[in-house]
Image (cartoon, rainbow, N blue to C red):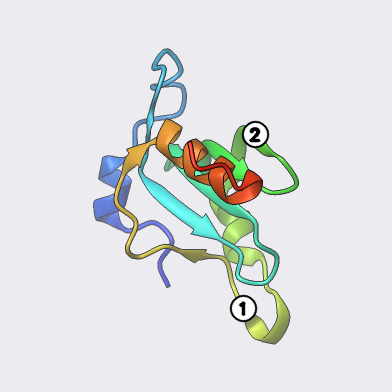
Amino acid sequence: MKLVTKELEKKFPEIYETQRQTDPVVQAKYFCPWNGWTWYATEFDKEEGLFYGLVAGFELEFGYFSLNEFESVEGPFGMKIERDLYWEPIPVSEVQKGLERSVYGNSN
């Protein structure tokens, strides 16, 4: 699976481009099928292969993550990091609300 298509690449703002925005849009969702980690990418530097966005791992935090690392990781039975092919871009605040509801069982 191609993790960043040419079409998707065009949608991403450059790194730091959304830093002044209060609610940047998550352009792509990546996930690890064997450990539950998920990355919500809001920016991408195609030269460096570097994303910025929300990381749902041990904690919810914003940070940088690497396309090269995604492509090189191999899990059980040859599994790889995947891109959610059905992802529709939404504001990061909506992602956070959904994650909080699923983690804390909160319906607000």
> Helix or strand or loop: what does disc 2 sit on?
strand
- Could you say which is closer to the camera, residue 12 or residue 106? 106
- Could you say which is closer to the camera, residue 35 or residue 100? 100
Residue 59 position within the rendered picture, expressed as x and y whole percent measured from the top left: 72, 41
Say if residue 84 shows up in the picture.
yes
On the image, which quarter does residue 1 sit in? bottom left
Closer to the chain start, of discs 2 and 1, is: 2
User: Which residue is situated farthest in the front direction here?
Assistant: 107
x 62%, y 78%: residue: 79
Say if residue 49 shows up in the picture.
no
- Could you say which is closer to the camera, residue 89 or residue 68? 89
Amino acid type assigned to the residue bearing label 2 in the image: Glu
Q: Nearer the viewer, mark 2 or mark 1?
A: 2
Check whether the beta carbons of the residues at disc 2 and disc 1 lie within 8 A of each other. Answer: no
Tell me if 19 is positioned left or right of 27 in this view: right
x 40%, y 50%: residue: 28
Residue 78 position within the rendered picture, expressed as x and y whole percent measured from the top left: 65, 83
Provide the residue designation for mark 2: 61
Provide the residue designation for mark 1: 79
Residue 21 position within the rendered picture, expressed as x and y whole percent measured from the top left: 39, 17
> Helix or strand or loop: what does disc 1 sit on?
loop
On the image, which quarter does residue 34 sit in? bottom right
Amino acid type assigned to the residue bearing label 1 in the image: Met
x 60%, y 48%: residue: 105
Mark count: 2
User: Which residue is situated farthest in the top direction here?
Assistant: 20
Residue 95 position within the rendered picture, expressed as x and y whole percent measured from the top left: 46, 41
- Could you say which is closer to the camera, residue 89 or residue 48? 89
| Circle 1 residues within 10 Å: few <14, some 14–19, many ≥20 | few
User: Which residue is situated farthest in the right direction here?
Assistant: 58
Label for residue 68?
none
